[in-house]
Image (cartoon, rainbow, N blue to C red):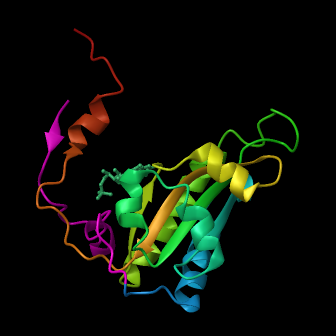
Amino acid sequence: MQRDHEPPVGIHPLLAGRFSPYRFDPSAGVDDDCLGLLLEAARWAPSAGNSQPWGFFTSRPGEPEHERVVRHLAPSSARWATDAGLLVVTLTHRHVDETQLLYSEFADYDLGQAVAHMTVQAQAMGLAAHQFRAFDLEGLTKELSPNPGWAIVSMIALGKAAEVPSERRDRRSVADLLSAPWTLPE
Ligand SMILES: Cc1cc2nc3c(=O)[nH]c(=O)nc-3n(C[C@H](O)[C@H](O)[C@H](O)COP(=O)(O)O)c2cc1C
């Protein structure tokens, strides 16, 4: 596989500047206006048939909801995510209520786009986002008890980064993106 360790070049600064920090400034809160704009950005993401199959649970340090989420973090994410000014639990409406029938085969895909919108909006507001799966999914699902058809997928820690991006960030090359799915004829 072809790898590329060059920093991003030529793309929009909001995309080039985005990274997932492992340190957040615990003194920097996320206020109600910022939280509202992050959710507004997610709201305007495209989705299959405009189904908008996403949902969120938000909590900030000091709020009772925060402790309900934090207690389910894995040790690896608790080290940095608890310092973030905002924790967002992401959910997808994957199944038709009370059945295993798919509501939309694109539900998780669409949620990913909504989260991408949120992360770029965060970057535009001087906040950083670190998405993660290092938490007890079963425990958090029991804790929050989402409605039938809804499934927790991931979490996002958002706040003021307390570190700069690493100078050596690994990415597959553009050539590999185009060639990896195919076997070229001999
Ligand atoms: C769905 C998803 C799950 C992730 N899970 C974790 C995780 O559990 N722990 C972690 O440290 N980072 C996690 N990440 C962050 C990725 O490791 C990170 O985005 C990737 O290494 C690229 O780095 P960058 O975001 O700084 O460019 C996750 C990212 C996504 C999108």
Residue under the image location 35 percent in, 65 percent down = 80
Looking at the image, residue 58 lies above or below residue 125: above
The secondary structure that dominates the magenta segment is loop
Give whichever of 165, 74 is nearer the camera.
Answer: 74
User: Is residue 156 toward the left or the right of residue 145 in the image?
Assistant: left
User: Is residue 29 toward the left or the right of residue 41 in the image?
Assistant: left
The stretch of residues the image draws in magenta is 1-26
Q: Which quarter of the rendered picture does the C terminus lie within?
A: top left
Q: Which quarter of the rendered picture does the N terminus lie within?
A: top left
On the image, the x and y values in percent for residue 67 come to 58, 69
Q: Quadrant of residue 18?
A: bottom left
Confirm whether residue 144 shows in the render.
Answer: yes
Looking at the image, residue 142 lies above or below residue 167: above
Residue under the image location 32 percent in, 62 percent down = 20
Question: Per the image, is 19 magenta?
Answer: yes
User: Is residue 6 toward the left or the right of residue 30 in the image?
Assistant: left
User: Is residue 116 toward the left or the right of residue 165 in the image?
Assistant: right
Give whichever of 181, 62 is nearer the camera.
Answer: 62
Residue under the image location 16 percent in, 39 percent down = 3
Question: Per the image, is 4 magenta?
Answer: yes
